[in-house]
Image (spheres, grey):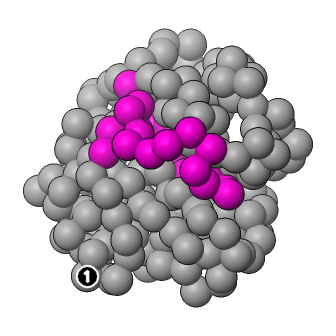
C-alpha cells in the first residue's frame, strides 16, 4: 500500500487534512456515489478512519484496512473496526463484502491494479466499488497546484509513471514532500479499473474550483 510512509506524520496529517475542504469534498463524493447501508463495507486505505466513521453513521458496517499502524491507532480511537493489511494482499474471503470504497489511494500504492484486483476478489458479485482520488491531469509531478488553489502550472513529466519524491509539482511544505507520491496518467488510471474487470458505470470530475483536483468513479464487479 504505502509501506507505512505515513507513520510519523499522522498527527500532522490529521491536523492539516482531515477536517479541511480537501478532505471533505472527496468524502462527500464517495458517500454520494455509494449511498447508505446496510451492508458490510470495506474501506481500503482507510488512514485515520475519518471517512470510515462517516460511512458507519449512514447504516454501513465498515471495516477499514491500512498499512500504517500509526494511522490505524487514530482510527481505533474513532471507534472504527480496522485491520492492518497491505491492499495488494487483503486478509478476507472471496466475495465477503457488499460494497467497497477507497479514497485517495492510487497516488500512494506501488501497483494500483493489484489493489483493484483484490477489491474485485473480496467484493460480492454486482456490489459497488467507489473510488475517489487525485485528478491525474492536474495533480502529479508535472503540475504545480498547491492546495488546488488558482490555476495549475504545468511542466514536463505528465507521461512519467511511477513514484516520485522530487518534481515541479511537489510543494516543499506539503504532504508529498513528506511521503512522496505515485503518478498514473489518466489513460493508465482508467485502464487499471478495466484490467481488474470492473464495470465502470459513473465517472466525474468534481467541480468545486476553477480546475478539478479530484475524480470520482463508481464501478461494479
Dominant secondary-structure state across the stretch colored magenta:
loop
The boundaries of the magenta stretch are: 85-110
Residue 9 drawn at (x, y percent):
17, 58
Which residue shows up at 33% across the image and 51% down it?
Answer: 66
> Which part of the image, by quadrant, shows the N terminus?
top left
Is residue 100 something that shows in the picture?
Answer: yes
Q: Is residue 181 left or right of residue 39?
A: left
Which residue shows up at 38% across the image and 54% down it?
Answer: 65
Which residue shows up at 16% across the image and 53% down it?
Answer: 7
Is residue 145 something that shows in the picture?
Answer: no
> Does the stretch in magenta take in 205?
no
Q: In this view, does 203 lie to the left or right of 59?
A: right
Q: Is residue 173 left or right of residue 148?
A: left
Q: Residues within 10 Å of mark 1 (few under 14, many from 20)?
A: few
- Considering the numbered disc 1 on the image, is that residue within a helix, a strand or a loop? helix
- Give the residue at mark 1: 77
> Does the stretch in magenta take in 107?
yes
Residue 95 drawn at (x, y percent):
62, 44
Residue 125 drawn at (x, y percent):
76, 42
Amino acid at each position: 500500500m504505502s509501506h507505512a510512509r505515513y507513520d510519523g506524520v499522522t498527527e500532522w496529517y490529521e491536523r492539516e487534512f482531515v477536517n479541511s475542504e480537501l478532505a471533505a469534498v472527496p468524502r462527500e463524493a464517495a458517500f454520494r456515489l455509494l449511498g447508505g447501508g446496510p451492508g458490510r463495507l470495506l474501506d481500503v486505505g482507510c488512514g485515520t478512519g475519518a471517512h470510515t466513521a462517516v460511512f458507519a453513521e449512514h447504516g454501513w458496517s465498515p471495516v477499514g484496512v491500512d498499512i500504517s499502524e500509526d494511522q490505524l491507532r487514530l482510527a481505533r480511537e474513532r471507534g472504527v473496526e480496522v485491520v492492518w493489511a497491505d491492499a495488494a494482499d487483503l486478509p478476507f474471503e472471496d466475495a465477503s463484502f457488499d460494497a467497497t470504497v477507497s479514497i485517495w489511494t492510487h497516488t500512494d500504492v506501488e501497483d494500483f491494479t493489484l489493489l483493484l484486483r483484490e477489491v474485485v476478489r473480496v467484493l460480492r458479485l454486482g456490489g459497488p466499488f467507489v473510488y475517489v482520488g487525485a485528478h491525474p491531469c492536474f495533480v502529479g509531478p508535472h503540475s504545480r497546484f498547491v492546495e488546488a488553489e488558482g490555476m495549475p502550472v504545468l511542466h514536463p513529466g505528465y507521461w512519467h509513471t511511477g513514484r516520485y519524491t522530487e518534481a515541479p509539482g511537489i510543494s516543499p511544505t506539503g504532504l508529498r514532500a513528506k511521503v512522496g507520491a505515485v503518478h498514473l496518467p489518466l489513460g493508465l488510471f482508467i485502464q487499471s479499473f478495466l484490467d481488474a474487470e470492473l464495470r465502470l458505470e459513473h465517472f466525474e470530475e468534481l467541480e468545486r474550483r476553477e480546475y478539478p483536483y479530484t475524480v470520482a468513479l463508481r464501478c461494479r464487479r
